[in-house]
Amino acid sequence: MALTKNKKVLDFVEAGAELAQPDEIVWITGDLGQLDELRKEAVKSGELIKLNQSILPDCYLHRTKVNDVARVEDRTFICTKSREDAGPVNYWMDPKQAYELASEIARGSMKGRKMYVIPYSMGVVGSPFARYGIEVTDSIYVVLNMAIMTRVGANVLKAIGPDGDFIKGFHAKCNVDAENRYIMHFPEDNTIISVNSAYGGNVLLGKKCFALRIASYLGKNEGWMAEHMLILGVTFPDGTKKYVAAAFPSACGKTNLAMLVPPKHYREKGYKIECVGDDIAWIRVGADGRLWAVNPENGFFGVAPGTNDHSNPNALAATKRGTIFTNVALDTDNMTVWWEGLNDDLPEHCIDWTGKPWDRTKFNKKDKSTCAAHPNSRFTAPAKNCPCISPEFDSKEGVPLSAIIFGGRRATTTPLVYQSRDWNHGVFVGSAMSSETTAAATGATGVLRHDPMAMKPFAGYHMGDYFQHWIDMGKAIKNPPKIFNVNWFRQDEDGNFIWPGFGDNMRVLEWILKRCDDAVDAEETAIGYVPRPQDIDLDELDYEIAPGHKFTQDDLKAILAVDKKRWAAEAEELESYYKNTIKTRIPAELTECLEKLKENCKN
Ligand code: SAT
Ligand code: MN
């Protein structure tokens, strides 16, 4: 039975049903009993595998088709009336053509299936930040994941009200045919359509599709920002708190930084990190002239491989109940999960992510094809499970930002950390981000590509207009956060990571926050302010870059150095990206920063 009298909602659901012709329509109420029945049904059909309930209560494993393991950027479209408005780094399709194509593919696709109607909220229901969506889908996996990642149920329909608007999301898994897979966004119609996939970012429409692509477009028009950022809170020994948002591309450690456990001597002094969000931040200017951020999500869709007791004990703890694992390995001796980097106890009896028995004797760390878990295998865990979740997680107003951090995976050139000269220069630094690609999207990994503000796959409109929006926001912020860039991924000639990363990133965070208070000096360089090596706390740092090579101040000096020759080349490359890729609508403020960088690198 329909749960609302809102005609727009009813018309949308009816149109979806008319097209896809499901046998039945099921409204998701948010009722725990209903979700439980769906889990049972999914276990019966094999869509979910029930894990050991005494070790992993309420946890399940799901395997996708092997052709459907990551976001598909080349099949993700922004469908604006004018091609120019989608901009140069998005794939574009004419909206009329897109609707027709999607209809053709989805027509009759839910025959013999049920269509679930998921009312969901991005943000705390009823808060001024919150935005609502309705996703219809024929996948129980999607329903159960959305019920973790967002706030779902009848109360959302109440919040939408009898006449309110919402973002329309239509998902049909069809035959999971990669050749007919389309993830389409219609920002001018508040609509998302996804067909022929059943994987995470392609189908959990509240996440990247709504909370970034559609929301970034809404934010541009309404004067706020939707960003691919974690949000964390730092508590200082005197009890004060400061908040930081950080943008890194997918699978570059946002979840790890958001849940960081500081080194022992910091903990002993009273430092604490709390996680507000690990992937998406919605940001507005507050009445006090500062930027305020909320995490619109309700769970974590984190990368499993590499997550362990050292790299991220908080994320690991979050996955111990109520979690859906996707494409990890199944340890059949005790019906638990395993992935590369979880521990050194390779399971003796194990089914790999494709559903085949796995032979641990053939495992070779360097060869992905011998891995038991897919490199982009994931856990969907409720945020409330996280031991370090911030008390501000459910705050309606969000948290005030002291700093914004950009970062990518860069083996060379980019120092461990540097600070921009001011807001506009910070926007320039974000626009100049490049990072090595990861398994989070299909295609080659380890290839350096431009990824401005980590939003290349997620800005729902023209990238030049997006830069302009950042510049314009700066004008509206009386007390702007300071903007920094970090790079945890510098490598030596043998490919070893020079900086330890993980919990030791606290040492860099501390410097960043001191800079926000003008409590520490810095060296002005060609690219911005870089720490003096003595200002990064190396106390009790015990890290071996390679066997026999312990990290010392000299290594720190090396990863803080700004090599003007390399930066001159970087600037030249960026100039070509601006000119040949973005081409138009680049704010003058950014080209001025580029000219200054070129000038600074000359001698
Ligand atoms: O697949 S998702 O887009 O949800 C995760 C990611 O790539 O960041
Ligand atoms: Mn992400």
Image: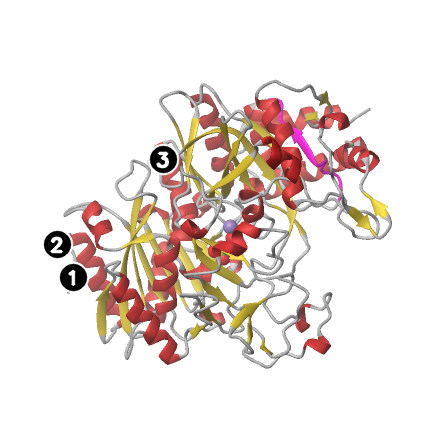
Foreground pick, 558 / 344: 344
- At 75% from the left and 48% from the top, the residue drawn is 497
Residue type highlighted by circle 3: Asn
Q: Are marks 1 and 2 in contact (CB under 8 Å)?
A: yes
> Where residue 95 sits: x, y (%)?
36, 55
Q: Residues within 10 Å of mark 3 (few under 14, many from 20)?
A: few
- At 68% from the left and 54% from the top, the residue drawn is 447
Residue type highlighted by circle 1: Ala
570 versus 437 height, above or below: above
> Where residue 592 sits: x, y (%)?
62, 24
Residue type highlighted by circle 2: Lys
Outermost right residue: 548
Residue 2 is tagged as 1
Q: Residues within 10 Å of mark 1 (few under 14, many from 20)?
A: few
- At 15% from the left and 53% from the top, the residue drawn is 7
Q: Secondary structure at mark 2?
A: loop
- Side of 546 relative to 297 (left or right): right
* C-alpha separation, residue under disc 3 versus residue under disc 1: 33 Å
- Side of 39 relative to 328 (left or right): left
Give the residues drawn in magenta, as a range.
412-421
465 versus 188 height, above or below: above
- Disc 3 vs disc 2: which is toward the camera? 2
> Where residue 345 sits: x, y (%)?
66, 68
Q: Secondary structure at mark 3?
A: helix
Residue designated by label 2: 5
434 versus 347 height, above or below: above
Foreground pick, 225 / 327: 327
Task: Tell me the quarter of the image containing the N terminus.
Answer: bottom left
Q: Secondary structure at mark 1?
A: loop
- Disc with the residue nearer the chain's start (3 vs 2): 2
> For residue 302: magenta?
no
Task: Tell me the quarter of the image containing the C terminus.
Answer: top right
